[in-house]
Image: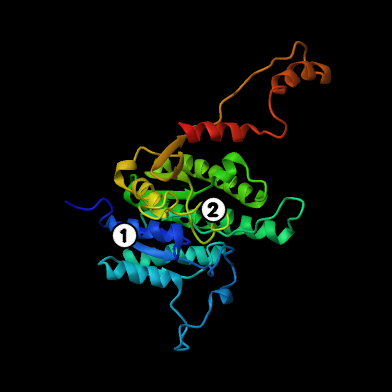
Amino acid sequence: MPLPLEGRSAIVTGAGRGLGRAEALELARLGAAVVVNDYGRPGPWGSTLPERNRGLGGGSGAAPAAPAEQVAAEIRAAGGRAVAHTGDVADFAQARELVALAVDAFGSLDVLVNNAGILRDRMVFSMSEDDWDSVIRVHLKGHFNTTRFAAAHWRERSKASGGPVYGRIVNTSSEAFLAGSAGQPNYAAAKGGIVGLTTSTALALAKYGVTANVICPRARTRMTEDVFAGIAAPDEGLDPLSPEHVAPLVGYLAGPAAARVNGQLFVVHGGMVAIVERPRVQAKFDSERDAFSYAELDALLTPHYASRPPGETFAATEVLTLKHD
């Protein structure tokens, strides 16, 4: 019986470690040939500077293999096909080269998993311009760049064949976008933008046979080690925060069985997958006159929020409900 992704090729960005590595290994296990992209340095903060990825190997004085090449070698050692790419997906030209590498190495591109990201956590009143720009650049622009060239590839293939083609995009958002995160205004904004990019892409590419979906994973990785510092891994069994809980959903969304899944947002962690619906209207008020006055809005809205604790947001309430479902 053929594997679900046998004969397909995939790109996984940020795949040198953590979540991206688990996703790349899962796609390879399902039969895909994988382009493993990674441009970061060790540690939770990531980097967009190539020199930060250099180091000394052991006692030999030789530089270690780049994380992307290590994962590609792991896939090849298991009998799969993989090549490494160490370019910066937030660079437009290098993202074009990444998609071209997949086509050149494996004949086409069928699956794109966008996972690359960095953190520059600060409270909004302490955040620098570079803290903001660098996170938006890597997360949001990085997702756009690869999507742009993958989408063009699929559109050209569809025009040449005269019909739909096989294409899957899986993007990575975060519960920081859903619930808010006080120390991550840049990260939350970028992750919210990725959801908008995904739903727009899903609508634009559906006629070509391409789907685009987005996940909000919760996983213990180098980038999130500070976030989950107070949650210890169990002594036995699989860590509920292991990336291996997330990778199967990515494999499913990349596969043929998910052909009808498009423009969807999933929260996934610890053996749980939740489908998040679009925001719904909680309450509606109509003006008695042509336009609202301050006094009328005060009379309508202030009582509506009177029972809420100070500082509570709508998103926090909704996500708490989601977690208990």
Q: Among all residues in the image, which is located at the extreme front?
A: 235
Q: Residue at x 54, y 70 (%)?
A: 41
Q: Is residue 252 above or below residue 38?
A: above
Q: Is residue 182 above or below residue 110?
A: above
Which residue, given by chain and number where applicable, does mark 1 sit on? 28
**Which of the two residues, 315 or 102, is positioned nearer the viewer here?**
315
Q: Is residue 100 above or below residue 256?
A: below
The three-letter code of the residue at mark 2 reads: Phe
The three-letter code of the residue at mark 1 reads: Ala
In percent of width and height, residue 50 lies at 56, 74
Q: Residue at x 54, y 59 (%)?
A: 223
> Can see residue 159?
no
Q: Among all residues in the image, which is located at the extreme top?
A: 288
Tell me which corner region of the image, top left, top right, bottom left or bottom right, holds residue 211: top left
Q: If you read the primary sequence from the N terminus, does the residue marked by circle 1 or circle 2 appear first?
A: 1
Label 2: few (<14), some (14–19) or many (≥20) C-alpha neighbours in 10 Å: some
Secondary-structure class at tag 1: helix
Secondary-structure class at tag 2: loop
Q: Is residue 230 left or right of residue 235?
A: right
Label 1: few (<14), some (14–19) or many (≥20) C-alpha neighbours in 10 Å: many
Q: Among all residues in the image, which is located at the extreme bottom?
A: 60
Quarter of the picture holding the C terminus: top left
In percent of width and height, residue 221 lies at 49, 58
**Which of the two residues, 21 or 307, is positioned nearer the viewer here?**
307
Q: Residue at x 51, y 83 (%)?
A: 56
In percent of width and height, residue 111 lies at 38, 54
Q: Which-is-in-front pick, marks 1 and 2?
A: 2
Q: Say which mark, if any, is on residue 228.
A: 2
In percent of width and height, residue 37 lies at 45, 65
> Can see residue 187?
yes
Q: CA distance from mark 1 to mark 2?
A: 28 Å
